[in-house]
Amino acid sequence: MPLSRTVKLGSIAEVIPGASVRDYEPRGSGAGLAPEGLTEAHVIPLSALDEDRPLNQDKAQPVWIKAALVDVDNIRTPALRHLDILITNRNEPRIVLLSEPGETLCKSDRAPNVATGALMIVRLKEQAGWALGRAHYLAWWLGHPKNRRVLRRLMKGTAVKVMTKYDMENIEVPIPHPDERLQGATTEGLIANYGERAKDLRRKQQELADLEYKRAQEVLYRMAKGELPVIK
């Protein structure tokens, strides 16, 4: 797909740090009265992220959290929303797209799930024209091996390497060029098609490698039998 231009990630998406430990306190699993100014929620730790499956809500921890942090009218809230992209902001980057609507609320008590400080949320801005409905493309692009290397380089520190909100906002993202031939095609479908073609290419490369190996084995066998001169 031809690319017309690049834009800074911060111009098309909100980059939202996870909730600080100062913003919430543990609560028991049973019902109870919320302390003043707090409401119930579940924090999602780094260990709940697995790129090969939906969010592991068994790792969610029940907490009392500042009510402002789960305000549905605030686009910068760390409370999770459908099609948010979660990124670990330290050590090895992991990228998870919340493609299942049920991942935004805890399955046990329907309280909102909130990202912790070890995570960042990338949330597309609705007014960003092309970006509406393009979360799958952005998650795929961020998860590409080349771009993972970029994310690793952005992480600074000694014992624990951390990536800042500022650095994330300044990542240059390529914008797909409008193409009449692609009208009616979904981003998800295009990415799935790319994945299938990449898988087919890897399969063909493996078949070629296997064929070359068999040829080499045959040559060595014939050398051992004296049918071919030994290569020195």
Image (spheres, rainbow, N blue to C red):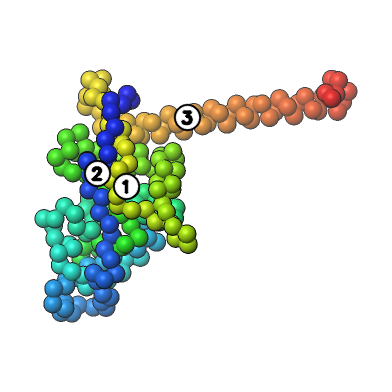
Q: Could you say where residue 178 lies in the image, as x and y percent from the top left? A: 23, 24
* Tag nearer the camera, 3 or 2: 2
Q: What residue type is labelled 2?
A: Gly
User: Of the residues under marks 1 and 2, which one precedes in the sequence?
Assistant: 2
Q: Could you say where residue 4 lies in the image, as x and y percent from the top left? A: 28, 25
Q: Which of the labelled discs sits on residue 168, or is there none?
A: 1
Q: Mark 3 points at which residue?
A: 200
User: The N terminus appears in which quarter of the rendering?
Assistant: top left
Q: Could you say where residue 8 lies in the image, as x and y percent from the top left? A: 27, 39
Could you classify mark 2 by the number of other residues whose Cα lies within 10 Å: few (under 14), some (14-19), or many (20 or more)?
many
Q: What residue type is labelled 1?
A: Met
**Along the line of sight, the residue nearer the viewer: 38 or 189:** 38
Task: Determine the residue positioned at 15% across, 42% down.
Answer: 126
- Determine the secondary structure under disc 1: helix
- Determine the secondary structure under disc 3: helix
- How many numbered marks does the figure carry? 3
Q: Which amino acid does label 3 sit on?
A: Asp
